[in-house]
Amino acid sequence: MTGTAYTPALTGRYGFRQTARMEWIKLRSLRSTAYALLLTVVGMIAMGVVTMANTKAPHGADKVASFDPTNNVLAGVALGQLVIGVLGVLVMTGEYASGTIRATLAAAPDRRRALTAKAVVFGGLALLVGELVAVVTFLAGTAALSPGVPAPSLGEPGVLRAVLMAGAYLAMVGLMGLGIGAITRHTASAVGIFVGITFVLPALLAGTTGTTIARFFPTMIAGNSLAVTVPVDGMLTPWAGFVVLCLYTAAILAVGGRLLVRRDA
């Protein structure tokens, strides 16, 4: 039988659609995917509920003005980004560790296309899970507030934007982990770089130079720009922070794709 529908099977070469399907099959077959996503969901919801249950009503004009329960309920993003980021690393470096990257590139020799398909599939899954867990965390956390504490609602200015941006942030850090994995091709080094960029460096810089430089790092952007409804002094605005994160993600994936083309599998 002949026809365009059978071209990939006959030639042994996949187009983008077939490559994306191949990546989806690999992603869903990994135990680490289910475990990591489950940990993200349970961890974020638990942290949101515990944080809100311990949130007290503000007293005094200054505290009332700076009170941001939406930011409190999304505190679990710090845990979620670690898990999703490491999963992104494993999605890439796991193929090098097992040697399946050779089969992947044999079926899809266009390495940029292969990386793009992997990023689209993993990024789409991370975005879906991120948005769902952010919304559920918000609803569960606000339900745990004491009766005397003002509860935020999705209809209030900035609240829905903060929740949705927090979910999108998880997808972006996952793609950053994927890109770093493509750059290093080694799990331990990639995880080390990811943790350094998201946790260690911003903490060190915040302690030595304040927010001047630290505000441009992912974790600081997430906690003080994206997931807030009350502006934080010295930090980026939500949309400026979102643009910076998009640029980071695109740059890391671009470097990973470039190195993937230049190096042998």
Image (tube, helix red, strand yellow):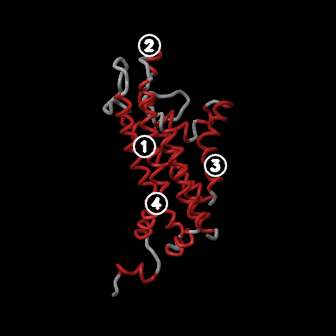
Question: What is the number of callouts on the image?
Answer: 4
Measure the C-alpha gap from mark 1 to mark 2: 33 Å
- Tag 1 secondary structure: helix
**Quadrant that contains the N terminus:** bottom left
* Residue placed under numbered mark 1 in the picture: 41
Secondary structure of residue under mark 3: helix
Residue at the spot x=51%, y=28% of the render? 232
The image shows residue 228 at horizontal and vertical percentages of: 45, 32
Residue at image coords 39%, 36%: 137
Pointer 1 or 2: first along the chain: 1
Mark linked to residue 59: 2
Circle 1 Cα neighbour tier, 10 Å, few/some/many (<14 / 14–19 / ≥20) = many
- Mark closer to the observer (3, 4): 4
Residue that numbered label 3 is attached to = 193
Q: Nearer the viewer, residue 24 or 214?
A: 24
Q: Amino acid at mark 1?
A: Val
Picture coordinates of residue 265, whole percent (x, y): 61, 70
Q: Determine whether, in the image, residue 177 is placed left or right of residue 4.
A: right
Q: Position of residue 225 (x, y in %)?
A: 49, 35
Q: Amino acid at mark 4?
A: Leu
Front position among marks 4 and 2: 4
* Mark 3 closeness class: few <14, some 14–19, many ≥20 residues within 10 Å: some
In the depicted structure, whether residue 80 falls above or below residue 185: above
Q: CA distance from mark 3 to mark 1?
A: 24 Å
Q: Amino acid at mark 2?
A: His
Per the model, the C-alpha gap separating discs 4 and 2 is: 49 Å
Residue situated in front as seen by the camera: 5 or 161: 5
- Most distant residue in the left direction: 155
Tell me which numbered mark, 3 or 2, is placed earlier along the sequence: 2
Instruction: Tell which circle, 3 or 1, labels the residue nearer the N-terminal end.
Output: 1
Q: Is residue 154 left or right of residue 38?
A: left
